[in-house]
Amino acid sequence: MTMTTQDVTDLYEEFGSDRLPPGQRETSKFPVLSKSGTPPFDPETWEFTVTGAVDEELSFTWEEFQDLPSVTQKQDFHCVTGWSKFDCEFTGVSFPTLAELAGVDDDACHVMFSGLDDYTTDLPLDQCMREEVLFAWDFDGEPLPRDHGGPLRVVTPHRYAYKGAKWVDGVEFLTEPERGYWELRGYSDSANPWNEERYS
């Protein structure tokens, strides 16, 4: 069965008049940036958890996660270091799909993402509850490369890419805001590319 690709590259119209955010340059390459090296991944022991302020905490094996309802979207990707890659095709599970499965408590206001490399990053819940926020395992029709966060990474086309945790293995719904790895080191908590919110 062929999956229809949703084109969400026009989401910039919600934030600014130009598809390319200010201070960015378009590139056809896909540079690799991470806080440390690529962590190991074992599909037999990998576990994805959903915890915190939810009706039901969840746990998925790699096979179970891939069996969740998925979508394919064409998105733009904006790195805080100043480059943007247009028309990236990602396949994965949307954040709202996962949130619906867990049931989000009324007092939840923030989300913390965690990765296999102990990376963390946070976003307000309302910025996560968008169909464009994906837990992606495919990139341009192929399994997501390990150095780009494979087997699973978050993509956040409406925010700088450090908000999209690589090698993601869990989300925690929070009732109070917390800061992640780069946010604690001076990066913007809001990270809106069209406002150039790079640093706090």
Image (tube, rainbow, N blue to C red):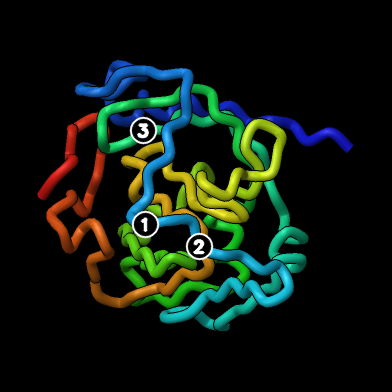
Q: Which residue is mark 1?
A: 36
Disc 2 is placed on an element classified as loop
Residue 63, x across and y down, in percent? 76, 66
* Three-letter code, disc 3: His
Who comes first in sequence, dot 3 or dot 1? Answer: 1
Q: Residue at x 29, y 30 (%)?
A: 15
Q: Which residue is mark 2?
A: 39
Left or right: 148 with respect to 16?
A: right
Q: Residue at x 61, y 65 (%)?
A: 41
Left or right: 52 with respect to 90?
A: left
Could you give the CA–CA distance between mark 3 and mark 2, rounded to whole angstroms? Answer: 23 Å
Count neighbours of disc 3 (C-alpha within 10 A) and say few if under 14, some if 14 to 19, many if 20 or more: many
Q: Looking at the image, is mark 3 or mark 1 nearer the viewer?
A: 1
Residue 176, x across and y down, in percent? 25, 75
**Numbered label attached to residue 78:** 3
Q: Circles 3 and 2: CB distance less than 8 Å?
A: no
Could you give the CA–CA distance between mark 3 and mark 1, rounded to whole angstroms? Answer: 20 Å
Residue 42, x across and y down, in percent? 66, 69
Who comes first in sequence, dot 3 or dot 2? Answer: 2
